[in-house]
Image: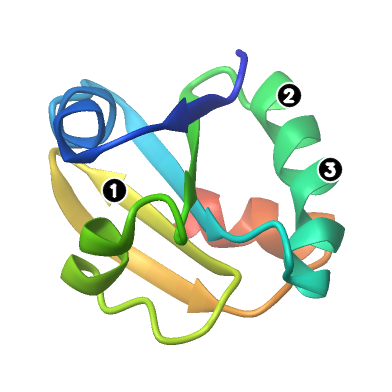
Amino acid sequence: MAVVHIHGTEEFEKEVLQADQKVLVDFWATWCGPCQMVGPIVEELSNEMEDVKVVKVEVDENPDLARQYRVMSIPMLAVFKGGELAKKQVGALQKPDLQKFIEEA
């Protein structure tokens, strides 16, 4: 499944909060080195984990969402289920760790 890039709170509500499946949200920024390392892993998992929607939120373009979900450091990876934040992780993860993080949420 292709990664969805969010542009605004209305799109976040539609794609994440109203989703009928588990959603991985990658809060990131273009200038963030660890974010650039995690990005390809997130892309890979979006293609491999068919039951999980993957969404990317660029924090500089979406400061309201970053503030709402208390993104203090990036990358911050969050899993939403049923419109609720189920789990979050700050910092880069290797692929097996990120997959386990998503599965356990």
* Secondary element type, mark 3: helix
Q: Which residue is mark 1?
A: 80
Among the two numbered marks 3 and 1 on one chain, the one whose residue lies closer to the N terminus: 3
- List the residue tagged with mark 2: 48
Which residue is pictured at 35% across the width and 35% down the height?
Answer: 22
Cα distance between the residues tagged 3 and 1: 21 Å
**One can see residue 53 in this view:** no
Q: Report whether 11 appears left or right of 96.
A: left
User: Can the viewer see residue 67?
Assistant: yes
Left or right: residue 44 compared with residue 104: right
Tell me the kind of residue under disc 3.
Answer: Pro
- Rendered image quadrant of residue 101: bottom right
Q: Amino acid at mark 2?
A: Glu
Residue pointed to by mark 3: 40
User: Is 44 positioned to the left or the right of 52 in the image?
Assistant: right
Q: Residue furthest bottom?
A: 72
Q: Percent from the top left, x then y, of residue 105?
A: 39, 57
Viewer-proximal residue, 104 or 57? 57
User: Where 12 falls versus 38 (above or below)?
Assistant: above
x 81%, y 58%: residue: 36
Tell me which numbered mark, 2 or 3, is placed earlier along the sequence.
3
Residue 42 vs residue 14: left or right? right
Label 1 packing within 10 angstroms: few (<14), some (14-19), many (20+): many
First of labels 1, 2 by sequence position? 2
Mark 2–mark 3 Cα distance, whole angstroms, equals 12 Å
- Name which residue lies at 36% across and 33% down: 7
Vertical relation: 16 (above or below) 73:
above
From what the image shows, is residue 15 above or below residue 9?
above
Q: Amino acid at mark 1?
A: Phe
State the residue in front, 19 or 32.
32
Q: Nearer the viewer, residue 92 or 20?
A: 92
